[in-house]
Amino acid sequence: MAAEIEIKWDSKSKRFKANITAKEALQALDGISEDKLVAVKVNGQPVDLTYPLTHDCVIEPITTDSPLGLEILRHSTAHVMAEAVKHLYPEAKVTIGPAIENGFYYDFDYSPGFTPEDLEKIEAEMQKIIAQKQPFQRKEISKKEAKKLFQSLGETYKLEILDEIPEDTVSIYQQGDFIDLCRGPHIEHTGKIKAFKLLSVAGAYWRGNENNPMLQRIYGTAFFNKKDLKAYLHFLEEAKKRDHRRLGKELDLFTQFEEVGAGLPVYLPKGAILRHILEEFEIREHLKRGYQMVMGPQLLKAELWKQSGHMDYYKENMYFTEIEEQLYGIKPMNCLAHILIYKSKVRSYRDLPLRYFELGTVCRHEKSGVLHGMLRVRQFTQDDAHIFCRPDQLNAEIRGVLDFVEEVLQIFGFDYEVELSTRPEKSIGSDEIWEHATGALIQALQDKGLKYDICEGEGAFYGPKIDIKLKDALGRKWQCATIQCDFSLPERFVLTYVDSDGERKRPAMVHRVVLGALERFIGVLTEHFAGAFPAWLAPVQVKVLTVTDRSVDYGRKVLTALQEAEFRAEADFRNEKLGYKIREAQLQKIPFMIVIGDKEVETETVTPRRRSGENLGSMKLTEFIELLRKEATIPKTKGGSPH
RNA sequence: GCCAGCGUAGCUCAGUGGUAGAGCAGCUGAUUCGUAAUCAGCAGGUCAGGGGUUCAAGUCCCCUCGCUGGCUCCA
């Protein structure tokens, strides 16, 4: 080991005695405030501040304002929570406790489970540990020693983890009397945790496998200061106000009835019109892009589902019914009828691509625990289409769908994430077919220059897919659009077309949805706009409000004129004060209100007001109708003409 | 499906084993009012459903249904 080493940071460089800690070096190189330091990167590798530097290296501080710094804080807070839990419930066994997107969790094997009151006790114990400023001490020991250690502690889950670590040496961290197997790095001491909160308890299977024992997971979050914690908790409160289930009731969009059954929402008048508008928009956009509308039945013989592979691969998600001793499956997907429509005629290469579009209602048996408002239901309607094309057209078709999705989501103002899902274990078709299909999707993504994550083994049983995910008010991701490449069903149903050389050839098939399930899309959309839909989507676009009874006759005329101009208008002619009516319309998030009083009657005008509170001043009704036309008619994407 | 929590008036929520409450909404009446709540009165309940413990159950126990947060699974 060299007696002196050279340490660089930024443009600075200095020689130090070997074994200087990273923290000392950082402070010597630049008087960085101790309060800002969380950990340090040595040659790009995150390590503890106490890490001894033994060779020439480049160091870089990890500070409290970096995402990595926050992650380290949260992971350390998870350790503190584990320490507190072990103090209070010594029989609990520790498992893993990572930092996650907005906080951290730690899973414990503790059969009585934790109650909300337990969380308070654990929080109090954590406060004590934090007040003691217990240092996080790292130690490297051999795997054998580690096994002995965790054996003696009775931490059997740690032993299981140890068995899967290939290296001979592992690191352990100790703070107070709590020792955990951990890669690190950690904050210097528990006193650096300035603000944290335990949020919830939940069951979680060990290693995420439902055959394993169920552990008790405690979720929490931590920040470097109280202000950030408060802001986060405030965000959670605000998210509750945007919750589509709450807004669904408040705005009379949709609801559920216990007596109807789980996962079966009901559209109220305002929600039904919203869905209708979306459907109108969708039909127009599809026709514009060369899709043809088709409609299949809800029930198809089980024999057909056998042929498609659904009986083997999707049965547990399907509902069945028997009619005159014949078994029928209620459709969980729309593809079969579309396939039969394709097959109903001899197809020429000149006919392709054929694009069949259906607002298809499907039923899927989802496990009761996964149901969630409109976002996860048991019956839903997809804006589904199946494209049958020649292999040489596949790339253009997939790109066309990606363009379609992009243009549509832009209209609503959604940000989205793209994922590519590959072959799952339970699947049909040969390896070659899967490779070809996956390659086609990747090619299209690359052509479009889209960034995407790969989800291994997450594809549909008949083919790989590109998924587009939208976020709800809490940032949870929900799959909406999906593009699935399928060479298997054309094979199973012996689909062919006659090529230019007179040979019968196999078409490729693309399953795709743009908005996805309308129920889910409406749920996400409601949260996205917090219920304040743009005028073209708003169930009620204008509300006519009278100041006194004297203006009702004129108000009625205005209402009729708006309705005749095909706007969704309502009136509030009740004998109430204007402020009261405005408040109510405002809470209903109606984009425009028209105020009508003596002045308007006299001058034959209207005084519109935006939902934003902006008073537009008096104008002729025709002027206002003109303004509405500009803002409230269904928009069109720029795309179109068959791709 | 699994773990935990919850279910009281249309909605939001109080309610210590001892006579079911409030606010808002609704209805009736008064008020005729100019950009986010006028006043008064009235009505509204198998306390999710079923079973049990108890002299007595909204409250304690069991089962079912539903909802919520997660896990697993998926548009």
Image (tube, grey):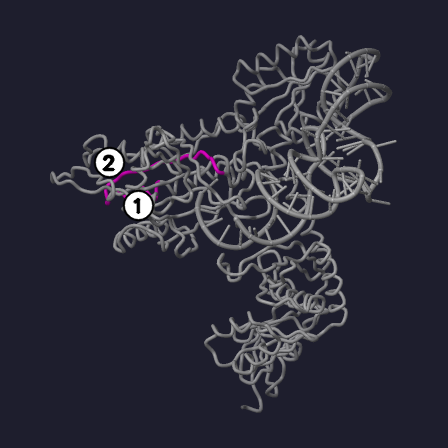
User: Could you say where residue A636 lies in the image, as x and y percent from the top left?
Assistant: 44, 30
User: Could you say where residue A449 lies in the image, as x and y percent from the top left?
Assistant: 39, 51
Question: Crowding at label 2, few (<14), some or many (≥20) Cα neighbours within 10 Å?
Answer: some
Question: Crowding at label 1, few (<14), some or many (≥20) Cα neighbours within 10 Å?
Answer: many
Residue toward you, A289 or A371? A371
Is the residue A533 above or below the residue A63 in the image?
above
Quadrant holding the C terminus of chain A:
top left
Instruction: Tell which residue pokes out farthest to the left in this image.
Output: A502
* Residue type at tag 1: Asp
Secondary structure at badge 1 equals strand
Residue in the image at 58% along x and 12% along y? A560
Q: CA distance from mark 2 to mark 1?
A: 16 Å
User: Could you say where residue A573 lies in the image, as x and y percent from the top left?
Assistant: 69, 15
Please name the residue that numbered disc 1 is placed on.
A486
Which image quadrant for residue B6? top right
Q: Is residue A234 magenta?
A: no
Residue toward you, A214 or A286? A214
User: Could you say where residue A97 lies in the image, as x and y percent from the top left?
Assistant: 59, 64
Residue toward you, A281 or A83? A83
Which image quadrant for residue A363? top left
Residue in the image at 51% along x and 71% along y? A160
Q: Which mark is drawn over residue A352?
A: 2
Co-location on one chain, circles 2 and 1: yes
